[in-house]
Image (cartoon, rainbow, N blue to C red):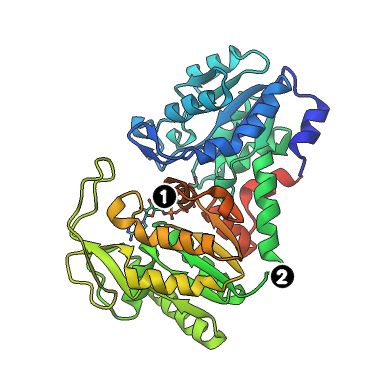
Amino acid sequence: MKTIDELLAEGVAGKRVFVRADLNVPLSGTTITDDGRIRAVQPTVEKLAAAGAKVIVASHLGRPKGAPDPAFSLAPAAARLGELTGADVAFATDTVGESARATVAALTDGRVAVIENLRFNPGETSKDDAERGAFADQLAELADVYVGDGFGAVHRKHASVFDLPARLPHAAGDLIATEVGVLKKLTEDVARPYAVVLGGSKVSDKLGVIDHLLERADRILIGGGMAYTFLKAQGHEVGSSLLQEDQIPAVLEYLRRAEEKGVEFVLPVDVVVSEQFPDLKTKAPTQHSTVPAHAIPAGVMGLDNGPETNKLYASKLADAVTVFWNGPMGVFEHPDYAEGTRAVAQALVDSSGFSVVGGGDSAAAVRILGFDENAFGHISTGGGASLEYLEGKTLPGLAALED
Ligand SMILES: Nc1ncnc2c1ncn2[C@@H]1O[C@H](COP(=O)(O)OP(=O)(O)O)[C@@H](O)[C@H]1O
Ligand SMILES: O=C(OP(=O)(O)O)[C@H](O)COP(=O)(O)O
């Protein structure tokens, strides 16, 4: 992979450089609740701008349905990038249309523009190679050089991640280089016990990693929205909790193999439940209670690990020498459901082992809950991306930068 410094040595002054970032930041309305992913790509953007490039920053945000949707606009992220870099950042209100073309044409050397959410175009995420390729062709017209630095999205075979770098001279940005450098160590000989904590809500995306973890980890702790498919598989009712019913046979197989291999599987023993999903905008206090994980009443949903689970998980992490954690333990965005996530973060801070926290929301959670980033071994901007990297899968966005 060509590094950004090698690219700079070749000279980028006056060139239009397309930076595929991951600016998929958590928002409350139009307010960014954690800007970590923007800060993470800032060094690459600033290096290119300082070298006189015309920098075009592109990203997805959320999962819009292939059409413009103001709720998923990148405008707040563009404004924040401007504040962080202390320079004007132009914003194009489309991705490959008139606004993008005019915005890029107006860029002078050393200036930066952000184009609108790539996923407003159906070609970005299409499974059809030709449709993705056609969108990549349009993106390629905007730029002379491609820099891949959206680590959080490198596991996606999307037009801007996979097809576009094949059409332009390309290099990897500093963020990708750092992320791969740290995660690579976890694929080599890890210091044991090696514990992995999995939670969050992208259950169908992430359950598959357990297949691999059964060969690597000593302990697997499951929480957050991931836990209920396991509890259901064990025969417990889970009310209206997040559930991936079609994965129950796979989960049963994971539990069986874990026992066979002596991998310790740890599930919540109690959970915090409520009849309704909380309002994350007003954060209004909710009616909630703690129940045993094997006795979740009908009509309620599990929204956090309970206090007994928090103690149990802290004890399982206390002597772990290597820990990888992806996915919050609850709906941490609301104070009534943040304790499980806080407890895992605190356990990692208290432990002397090496901990990697990965994922847009997990990384945001530790910062929003007030933990010092430096208390963790590494905070990765990618959840799904880091899990798939650890699995040893070929990541489209890294493979595309190889040659
Ligand atoms: N029990 C739960 N039910 C529903 N959502 C949950 C639950 N626990 C955690 N979540 C949600 O999971 C989201 C993060 O999941 P995910 O995207 O998989 O993590 P990451 O971005 O760290 O990879 C958070 O927004 C959080 O509110
Ligand atoms: O937030 C992201 O991934 P993550 O939640 O696994 O960290 C990335 O921006 C990828 O987003 P996607 O899972 O909608 O493709």
The mark total stands at 2
Amino acid at the residue labelled 2: Asp
Residue name at image x 32 percent, y 68 percent: 306
Rendering coords of residue 291 (x, y %): 24, 72
Q: Tell me the CA gap for discs 2 and 1.
A: 32 Å
- Nearer-N-terminus badge (2/1): 2
State the residue at coordinates (41%, 41%).
Answer: 26
Closer to us: mark 2 or mark 1? 1
- Say which quarter of the image contains residue 55: top right
Q: At 75% across and 24% down in the image, what residue appears?
A: 12
Q: Which numbered tag is attached to residue 189?
A: 2
Seen from the viewer's position, the closer of residues 372 and 379 is 372
Mark 2 vs 1: CB contact within 8 A: no
Report the disc number at residue 403. none
Residue 2 image offset from top left, x and y in percent: 77, 40
Q: Amino acid at mark 1?
A: Leu
Q: Is residue 226 left or right of residue 84?
A: left
Residue 369's disc is 1
Most extreme residue toward the right is 9
Residue farthest along the bottom direction in this orientation: 260
